[in-house]
Image (cartoon, rainbow, N blue to C red):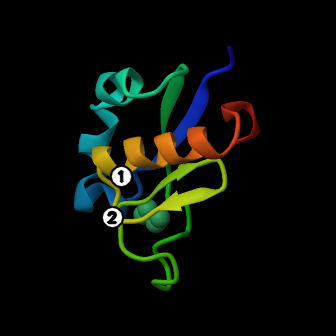
Amino acid sequence: MKPLTITICTGTTCYVMGSGYLLSLQEQIESACSRPVEIVGSSCLGLCKDGQYGRAPFVQIGSTVIAEATAEKIIETLKQQTARKPMEQI
Ligand code: FES
């Protein structure tokens, strides 16, 4: 099964706000998800520029943006998306 990609912004703003810590939580996030996940770091996603998306750190799962991301928010989003539609569509 193709892993679900979780993109964690590691741009300066997000990193200062804690995204580096999120990168270390792959095992915790994987164990909470019913399918394989791939956690990748990314340079600035451009979400921190004007406050439209909320506050850093930002994480993207498919087209879903998580602002002020925490491991708990990531896991909750994964569970909501899994309940809404098959993970292959995310
Ligand atoms: S530094 Fe993360 S969105 Fe810009």
Mark 2, Cα crowd under 10 Å, few <14 / some 14-19 / many 20+, is some
Residue 49 lies, with reference to residue 34, above or below; the image says: below
Residue 18, image quadrant: bottom left
Question: Does the beta carbon at disc 2 come under 8 Å from ligand 1?
Answer: no
Count how many numbered circles sit on residues in the image.
2
Q: Which residue does the numbered mark 1 point to in the structure image?
A: 73
The residue mark sitting in front, 1 or 2, is 1
Is 6 rendered above or below residue 45? above
In this view, the residue in front, 57 or 31, is: 31
Residue type pointed to by label 2: Glu
Left or right, 6 with reference to 70: right
Pointer 1 with pointer 2, Cβ within 8 A: yes
Q: Give the spatial CA distance, label 1 vs label 2.
A: 9 Å
Q: Which residue is drawn at 73% across and 31% down?
A: 88
Q: As rendered, which of 59 and 88 lies closer to the eye? A: 88
Identify the residue at the far right of this view.
89
Percent x, y for residue 65?
A: 53, 60
**Residue 72 relative to residue 5: left or right:** left
Near mark 1 (Cα within 10 A), the count class, few <14, some 14-19 or many ≥20, is some
- Residue at x 65% of width, y 47% of height: 62
Q: Residue 16, image x and y in percent? A: 24, 60
Image quadrant holding the N terminus, namely: top right
